[in-house]
Image (spheres, helix red, strand yellow):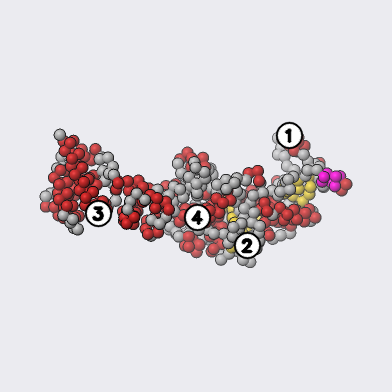
């Protein structure tokens, strides 16, 4: 049987990185097994539908390089791939299930159910609409055929008929076998009064009709596994394999990661921006390669100490045995480190063609773009760091007064005059000449370099000093040296 997996998000807002991680693991599993990766939009709950969400999901997958083989945009032989367009299919299959005796009509009003719930809970019991009490409610099992026909003219839902006293056993590829007694389950609603299926019914019917061989989804759906197994059994269908992925946890490790955590601590939880006030990883300077790499590490490893992978490497190395059971703690600094590694490994010619990078380099001559990026490349943990790292090229930072105080007794003027002299010569061996002079005159190398860096940059940290001098050019370098000499003279008077 050909491997077919699906990523099935609901278009109710921006895609959380937990959802993107689920998409990634589905994608990697499909590629490893030479199978099919499907995007299915689960939009049966139109009350929660948010305009723009589906486009956001599609754009996110494309940004990450995970193009669905089948889906609303890609097409395919098992569509439609939006659940809202499959209403006739669900109607057909719910009728089949009723004919098989696996489901029944229920006519109880919300008020009647609320009254029954209150009565049960008054005795400190849990209310369940189940085999134990279903005959006391208004449904096609308790009513006569004539009463049922009459009731069908009004509002109704359709419920799964769960037999009592049976053990439901279903295997999860990550967590082992899950067992639940049907006495603990209720007769879940499969079709709502508006004629739309519930998530559970549509999910199972679609997975069956789309020939999904393995359902890979988040741990939060594990409690639904016995119910889904019962729906498969009620139809007489073979169940696919299941994998329930570990949660992505808050940085503290306590609880599921949420947007509120990102808002509080200043990191994104969405891959792309959502509106004007919610930036995503992309807008915060992350490369898609880093996004994919870091998400893969949240709940999976290849059995080695290696933490850096290309998408192609992940496709070949991915295995179910490498997926952990426990939750994976989100670490933004680790994500930034991965991004730093991807930036340093990337071809600079490609990087400077990116729209965001072009925008940040637009104030500099185009002929210098490559050299400028290479100058600070090793210092970037985000592409957005580029503007700040290059700001001294246009104007040096305010002089570090603490450094000046330490240098004032070390003859900074004479050192700066010597640097100026060598720069004026257009000396191609500038570094070597200055080092030799410092050695001959017993000037500490630290003092020499601090004076030079303070003149060109304004502070003691930054990229390679001699590359900076070369990029600034002779005229601007000399001006900055002169400016520092004047500043020190003013401070000394």
Dot 3 or dot 1, earlier in sequence: 1
Instruction: Give the answer, above or below, for where 71 lies relative to 386.
Output: below
Q: Secondary structure at mark 1?
A: helix
434 sits left or right of 267 in the view: left
* Residue 315 seen in this snapshot: yes
Dot 3 or dot 2, earlier in sequence: 2
Instruction: Give the answer, above or below, for where 180 lies relative to 70.
Output: above
Q: Nearer the viewer, mark 2 or mark 1?
A: 2
**Residue on which the image places disc 4:** 63
Q: Tell me which segment is drawn in magenta.
A: 147-153
Dot 4 or dot 2, earlier in sequence: 4
CA–CA distance in space, label 3 to label 4: 37 Å
Tell which of 169 and 468 is nearer to you: 468
Quarter of the picture holding the C terminus: top left
**Residue on which the image places disc 3:** 470
Q: Nearer the viewer, mark 1 or mark 4?
A: 4
Dot 3 or dot 4, earlier in sequence: 4
**Residue on which the image places disc 2:** 76
Q: Nearer the viewer, mark 3 or mark 1?
A: 3
Q: Tell me the residue at 29%/48% (across/down).
A: 393
């Amino acid at each position: 049987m050909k491997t077919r997996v699906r990523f099935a998000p609901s278009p109710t807002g921006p895609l959380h990185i937990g959802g993107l991680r689920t998409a990634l693991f589905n994608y990697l599993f499909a590629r490893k097994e030479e199978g099919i990766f499907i995007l299915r939009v689960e939009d049966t709950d139109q009350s929660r539908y948010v305009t723009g969400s589906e486009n956001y999901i599609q754009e996110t997958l494309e940004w990450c390089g995970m193009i669905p083989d089948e889906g609303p945009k890609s097409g395919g032989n098992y569509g439609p791939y939006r659940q809202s367009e499959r209403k006739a299919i669900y109607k057909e299959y719910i009728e089949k299930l009723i004919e098989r005796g696996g489901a029944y009509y229920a006519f109880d009003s919300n008020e009647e159910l609320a009254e029954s719930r209150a009565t049960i809970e008054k005795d400190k019991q849990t209310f369940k609409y189940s085999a134990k009490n279903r005959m006391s409610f208004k449904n096609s099992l308790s009513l006569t055929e004539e009463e049922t026909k009459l009731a069908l003219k009004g509002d109704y839902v359709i419920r799964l008929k769960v037999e009592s006293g049976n053990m439901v056993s279903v295997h999860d590829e990550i967590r082992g076998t899950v067992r639940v007694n049907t006495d603990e389950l209720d007769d879940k609603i499969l079709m709502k009064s508006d004629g739309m299926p519930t998530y559970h019914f549509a999910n199972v019917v679609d997975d069956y009709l789309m020939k999904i061989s393995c359902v890979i989804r988040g741990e939060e759906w594990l409690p639904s596994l016995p119910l889904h197994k019962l729906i498969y059994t009620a139809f007489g269908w073979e169940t696919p394999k299941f994998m329930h992925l570990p949660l992505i946890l808050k940085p503290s490790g306590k609880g599921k990661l949420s947007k509120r955590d990102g808002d509080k601590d200043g990191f994104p939880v969405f891959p792309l921006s959502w509106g004007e006030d919610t930036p995503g990883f992309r807008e915060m300077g992350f490369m898609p390669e880093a996004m994919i790499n870091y998400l893969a590490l949240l709940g999976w490893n290849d059995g080695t100490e290696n933490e850096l992978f290309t998408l192609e490497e992940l496709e070949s190395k991915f295995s179910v045995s490498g997926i952990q059971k426990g939750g994976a703690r989100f670490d933004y600094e680790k994500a930034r480190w991965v991004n730093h590694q991807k930036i340093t490994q990337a071809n600079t010619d490609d990087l400077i063609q990116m729209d965001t990078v072009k925008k940040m380099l637009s104030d500099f001559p185009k002929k210098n773009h490559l050299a400028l990026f290479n100058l600070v490349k090793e210092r970037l943990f985000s592409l957005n760091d580029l503007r700040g790292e290059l700001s001294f090229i246009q104007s040096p930072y305010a002089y570090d007064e603490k450094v000046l105080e330490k240098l004032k007794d070390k003859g900074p003027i004479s050192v700066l005059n010597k640097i100026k002299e060598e720069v004026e010569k257009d000396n191609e061996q500038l570094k070597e000449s200055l080092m030799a002079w410092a050695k001959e005159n017993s000037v500490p190398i630290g003092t020499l370099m601090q004076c030079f860096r303070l003149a060109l940059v304004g502070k003691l940290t930054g990229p390679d000093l001699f590359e900076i001098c070369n990029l600034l050019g002779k005229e601007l370098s000399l001006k900055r040296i002169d400016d520092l000499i004047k500043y020190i003279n003013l401070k000394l008077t």
